[in-house]
Amino acid sequence: MSATDTQQAPSVGRGSGEPMIQIRQLSKWFGNFQALDNIDLTVSRRERIVICGPSGSGKSTLIRCINALEPYQKGELLVDGIPVSDNLKNIDAVRSEVGMVFQQFNLFPHLTVLDNLTLAPIWVRKIPRAEAEETARYYLERVRIPEQADKYPGQLSGGQQQRVAIARSLCMKPKIMLFDEPTSALDPEMIKEVLDTMTELAKEGMTMLVVTHEMGFARKVANRVIFMDEGRIVEQNDPETFFNNPQSERTRLFLSQVLGH
Amino acid sequence: MTDLAAPTTAPPPAQATSPLNWIRQNLFNTWYNSLLTILLLWIAYQLVPPIVTWLTVDAVWWAAPSEVCREAAGACWAFIHEKWRFIVFGFYPHAEQWRPALAMVIGLGLLAASCNRALWNRWLALGWLIGLPAIGILMSGGILGLTHVPNTRWGGLPLTLGLAVIGLVVAFPLGILLALARRSDMPAVRAVAIIYIELIRGVPLITILFMASLIIPLFLPSGVNFDRLARAQIGMIMFAAAYLAEVIRGGLQAIPKGQYEAADSLGLSYWQKQRLIILPQALRISIPPIVNTFIGFFKDTSLVIIIGLFDLVGAARASLADAEWRGFYKEAYLFIALIYFFFCYMMSAYSQHLERTLDHSNRRKGDLG
């Protein structure tokens, strides 16, 4: 564990010690705009981390770097010991261990729900179809929509689609799950069903990084909350301290805006 | 919105009107619409009865010498009666014309079966595996006691269909590869695709056919004899591939970035992503322009006449060269127009069927939050 990391988060309850994600001095630019500025972050197994911050603060960019959807220009990023770099083999290895849930669900509209779930296990993991379907039905049961297996994504509600997307990632048996604003595109009455699914996942010990504005979820589920602004980690703490006793002025301002109404 | 009115179950208001009312409301609702309606009725009255009379009442329907036709006021269907086999089969030996006929039946039968995805099984694959050589043997002969017919004597509808079907079947995957190449991250691959597509698209098909038939042989070492039909076929494939590539690229561009990212994050390789996620969606959106290109290409095969191949149009023109039957071009062109229309309409109808069956956004169309 690096020195900077221990410095930044001294009293945070960790998962089970071994680091799953190690990020050191990570910087990224979009053209001349610096999106990430020297990010240091270590995530242990079974940690549930919520990342919040104003839009444009780099929080989505940070988790998109973790599964190589975005390239970075400086620093070091290891996932389960594998360096995320330009090496295609490494990228494939990392992506098969990291699941991702998107704001816009990104289900495959031309495939049934069941085919959405079995596609990657069959083609990437080379699992026999029957076995893949069994796994898929198990996870559909888990996200409480087993009866939708033969429908197409376009026939489901937003909340159902997002739960299918979560199940699709879980079918690959990932070690880490990334959530990129998973409830931001949902109608209010559907947010709860998705958050409930995520809460259950956290209880089972999944390592999770969640970019979200759902502060209730952060308070209840996260073991660490990170506040980002202008491409930097401004503050990170356990939820209790983060919400009740924020250290920086910017965090306080942000929280008053998010929680104020 | 705080207006929480109870949901109503009242039926929509009735909108039925009598036909007379409909006519008054739609055709005679203003003075200029009334004028237009009357004008169009008058034009139709001037045109339709004479055409129908020419086509049917005054026409010579059955086999008759050309003199009878020349005295009649109507269409000379006796000409078609006399010449249809030549128009359909060109210079293929008369006694052997059952062979191209059978070849067409096999080819079109296999194509029709392949249009139904429920029939995509190993039997269909076996059918193609046997059918394609069978078509080749039937057309060319030389074995199994069939007399050899060189492809310089092939013509008419089998030639048109062969050029179009083989052309499209080969050009389609080439077009997909070119479209993917043009969107590639690799600059060299992209450059090759752009140069190829822009060069081919910038040149008329006639020029490509001339090049294929006249210029390419100049570059070949002497003694290498490259078949004229094959050269024309290759030229047409190159042409169609460039157009299809641009149409497919349009479809690729319409696929949201999220689909690529979802496929990437699941660990799919480039080719898996393209084949399983991107192309099925991109091709479905591109069905109308793809079929447009197919239909255009089908009719463009008639240009092979300029390098001396007698396709359907060529055979129809050649049939008019007979001194006895000179001048019946209206009947000849109507006849082949009907044949062209049949095949083009089939393609169009099938594409509409395909669009309906592949549309899975049925319930929430346009409702994306």
Image (spheres, coloured by chain):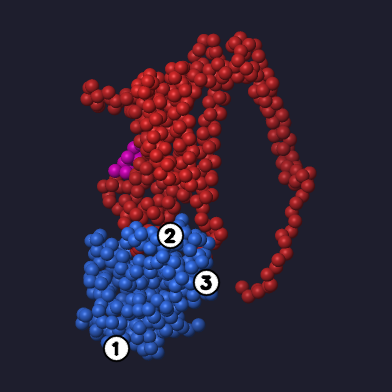
Report the magenta stretch's main SS: helix
Using the numbered discs, state the Cα–Cα distance from disc 2 to disc 1 in whole angstroms: 44 Å
Number of other residues with Cα within 10 Å of mark 3, as a class: few under 14, some 14 to 19, many 20 or more: few
Q: Is the residue under label 1 in contact with that under label 2 (CB below 8 Å)?
A: no
Question: Residue B265 location in percent, x, y?
Answer: 35, 63
Q: Earlier in the sequence, mark 1 or mark 3?
A: 1
Tell me which residue sits at (65%, 74%) in the image. B4
Q: Amino acid at mark 3?
A: Asp
Question: Residue A18 location in percent, x, y?
Answer: 25, 79
Q: Colour of chain A?
A: blue
Image quadrant where residue B147 sits: top left
Chain assignment, label 1 = A
Q: Earlier in the sequence, mark 2 or mark 3?
A: 2
Vertical arrangement, residue B311 with respect to residue A253, above or below: above
Number of other residues with Cα within 10 Å of mark 2, as a class: few under 14, some 14 to 19, many 20 or more: many
Q: Which residue corresponds to mark 1?
A: A11
Q: Which mark is residue A187?
A: 3
Q: Which residue corresponds to mark 2?
A: A115
Q: Which chain is red?
A: B
Q: Which mark is residue B183?
A: none
Q: A242 or A138: which is nearer to us?
A: A138
**Which secondary structure lies at badge 1?**
loop
Q: Which residues are magenta?
A: B192-200
Q: Is residue B307 magenta?
A: no
**Which secondary structure lies at badge 3?**
loop
Q: B243 or A96: which is nearer to us?
A: A96
Q: Amino acid at mark 2?
A: Asp
Work out whether disc 2 and disc 3 sit on a shared chain.
Answer: yes
